[in-house]
Amino acid sequence: EPEVTQTPSHQVTQMGQEVILRCVPISNHLYFYWYRQILGQKVEFLVSFYNNEISEKSEIFDDQFSVERPDGSNFTLKIRSTKLEDSAMYFCASSPGQGFRGYTFGSGTRLTVV
Amino acid sequence: AQSVTQPDIHITVSEGASLELRCNYSYGATPYLFWYVQSPGQGLQLLLKYFSGDTLVQGIKGFEAEFKRSQSSFNLRKPSVHWSDAAEYFCAVGADNTDKLIFGTGTRLQVFP
């Protein structure tokens, strides 16, 4: 069964550093998402992306965050200057179309900011 | 705005006992409803989903859920719990006018032998 692949599975970074989290969505999917889960809390929507632009973002997704689909296969989340409170599990998801049929999550990247 | 409530933060059951995890949602029209399971340090695994049709939905690992519009609920059930079912369970809702899922706060299931 097709999978959404996220790398790395765990990343440790120093506060203030830039970090890029990578995702390879399912190949025929057109809609892409990032979610975040702070340890012990619920999963929260960050951003959705379609046709090379952001279609929706949450209030969490401020100017220090950006997303990009640089090469037609990868989908990245960049955090420009990491803070301690950015430590969380970040999940990528993709979907073949609008709506939720085929909505698939990756296994996540655990980001630790020290 | 859509919201999801999982009233039980933590549930403990004995192995072999039946299980019901509660989920209530807030949304005017028919929502898209999901249950995910997350083992410690792991990703989200889809257990089952409801989009339309039969209100009793069968999922993986012997789980089922029932959509009850009158109660705005989508409770997850399993007739006989196994020790390997110990995990965090998240209910989520999606709506027609958005592609984002709204998650509940989760229910941690502990299973005693």
Image (cartoon, coloured by chain):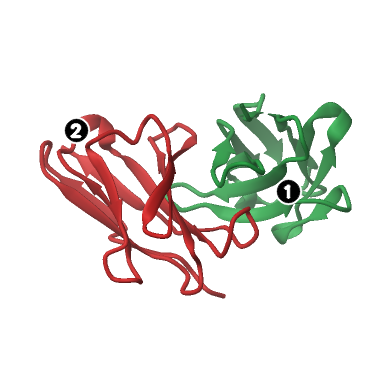
- The numbered disc on residue A88 is none
Residue A1 spot, x, y in % from top left: 57, 75
Establish if A73 lies above or below A79. Answer: below
Dot 2: what SS? loop
Residue in the picture at 28% in, 71% down: A71
Dot 1: what SS? loop
Residue B27 spot, x, y in % from top left: 71, 30
Does B35 sit left or right of A92 as displayed?
Answer: right
Does A51 sit left or right of B67 as displayed?
Answer: left
Q: Considering depth in this image, is A94 or B9 the residue closer to the camera?
A: A94
Establish if A30 lies above or below A109. Answer: below
- The numbered disc on residue A83 is 2
The quadrant of the image that shows the N terminus of chain B is top right
Residue A9 spot, x, y in % from top left: 32, 58
Residue in the picture at 14% in, 46% down: A18
Examine the image and state in which quarter residue B72 appears. top right
Examine the image and state in which quarter residue A50 appears. bottom left
Examine the image and state in which quarter residue A69 appears. bottom left
Does B94 sit left or right of B18 as displayed?
Answer: left
Residue in the picture at 66% in, 46% down: B35
Residue in the picture at 61% in, 48% down: B36
The quadrant of the image that shows the C terminus of chain B is top right
| Badge 2 density bin: few <14, some 14–19, many ≥20, Cα 10 Å | some
Q: Amino acid at mark 1?
A: Val
Q: Amino acid at mark 2?
A: Lys
Q: Chain of mark 2?
A: A
Q: Considering depth in this image, is B64 or A60 the residue closer to the camera?
A: A60
The red-coloured chain is labelled A
Q: Read off the residue under disc 1.
A: B81
Cα distance between the residues tagged 2 and 1: 40 Å
Residue A65 spot, x, y in % from top left: 26, 41
Marks 2,1: beta carbons within 8 A: no
